[in-house]
Amino acid sequence: MAETDAERYRQEAEECRKLAARAMSLHDKDAWLSLAADWMKLAENAAERRLRLFGDE
């Protein structure tokens, strides 16, 4: 089964959260968490776009 854009973006967000958990500084942790939030927004947008284009396949 092909991975959707939304799934890939969620995986990127999860990776950012893992890196945030290992970050040595608060600044780095905040940066990783901000990136994770951005990836999740992209995932939500991609999922909505897919639903509009293809419905509930």
Image: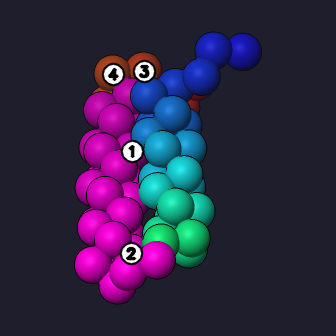
Farthest-out residue, bottom = 26
Label 4 element class: helix
Give the mark count: 4
Q: Which mark is residue 4?
A: none
Q: Are marks 3 and 4 in contact (CB under 8 Å)?
A: yes
Residue 18, horizontal then vertical, whole percent? 58, 62
Label 2 element class: helix
Q: Earlier in the sequence, mark 1 or mark 4?
A: 1
Residue 23, horizontal then vertical, whole percent? 47, 72
In the rendered image, which residue does mark 2 sit on? 29
Label 1 element class: helix
Amino acid type, callout 2? Lys
Cα distance in 3D space between marks 3 and 4 = 4 Å
Q: What stretch of residues is rendered in magenta? A: 24-51
Q: Which mark is residue 43?
A: 1
Amino acid type, callout 4? Leu
Q: Is residue 6 visible?
A: yes
